[in-house]
Amino acid sequence: MAILQNGPNGPIIGKFGSVSAYMLKDQNVVRGPKRKRSSPPSAAELLNRKKQQVAGKFAGHNKRLLEFGYQFLAEKGSRVGAFQLAQRHIFKEAIEIDAENNPFVNPERLLLFSGPLTPLSNCQVSINNDVIDLSWEADDHYSDSVYKINLVLLDPFNESHLRTSIAPVSDGSCSVQFDRLKRKITDFHVYVAIWDTLDGGFSNSIYCGVI
């Protein structure tokens, strides 16, 4: 690969025989033909491909939720947006390998929200018919009513549900009616996070368990 600097006739763009030229991040890049690989992929490479596929499938199915949960981390004008940041987290930090050497997304390691605020501590969840009861340890830092609780019920490859600003963090507990609990056919993984509704920003989500 070559990068042209201040060519006399401007940037070169297009294909010239086996050479291709194009613009990338304001640089004029020139590449020769790709070399064909003669050796088969290693076991580590094959596993890495599987991890990428699992992470990509999970992220794609939950794209809108992840874009919301990572929105405040994405820098304006950056080529790496909220969704890409979430994908990176899933691939690097939430993938584990099972006994048969197959990768999977571990719900307990997953962050559906990410941000600089201090997460909740000692959060407990239970259900009573169609009501979800949540409790957490109150924190004096979040005494202002602008700090709210966001709730996610995640079914990784079916339907997931987001409830925003369900209660002020300072309350220490809340109950949320959720009619679909009566007719759910699978379990939901429960996540909560803090949202600064005035200035923007989330805490990392915490995993509360399965209902």
Image (cartoon, grey):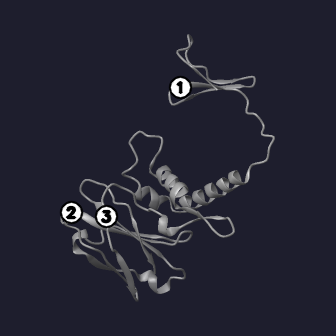
Asked if labels 1 and 2 touch by Cβ distance under 8 angstroms, the answer is: no
Q: Image quadrant of residue 171?
A: bottom left
Is residue 34 depicted above or below 74 in this figure? above
User: At 25% across and 63% down in the image, what residue appears?
Assistant: 147
Q: Amino acid at mark 2?
A: His
Q: Nearer the viewer, mark 2 or mark 3?
A: 2
Mark with earlier residue (3, 1): 1
Position of residue 162 measured from the top left corner of the image (x, y, whole percent): 41, 68
Q: Is residue 123 left or right of residue 207?
A: left
**Percent from the top left, x then y, of residue 57?**
60, 60
* Residue at the disc numbered 1: 27
- On residue 194, the disc is 3
The residue drawn where x is 31% and y is 64% is 194
Q: Secondary structure at mark 1?
A: strand
Q: Are marks 2 and 3 in contact (CB under 8 Å)?
A: no
* Label 2 – label 1 distance at C-alpha: 47 Å
Mark 2 burial class by Cα count in 10 Å: few <14, some 14-19, many 20+: few
Q: Which residue is mark 2?
A: 141
Number of dots carrying numbers: 3
Q: Amino acid at mark 3?
A: Ile
Q: Nearer the viewer, residue 77 or 94?
A: 94
Residue pictured at 27% horizontal, 66% vertical: 148
Q: Earlier in the sequence, mark 2 or mark 1?
A: 1
- Give the quadrant of residue 165: bottom left
| Outermost residue toward the right in this view | 38
Q: CA distance from mark 3 to mark 1?
A: 41 Å
Is residue 73 visible to us here?
yes
Q: Identify whether 81 is placed above or below 146.
A: above
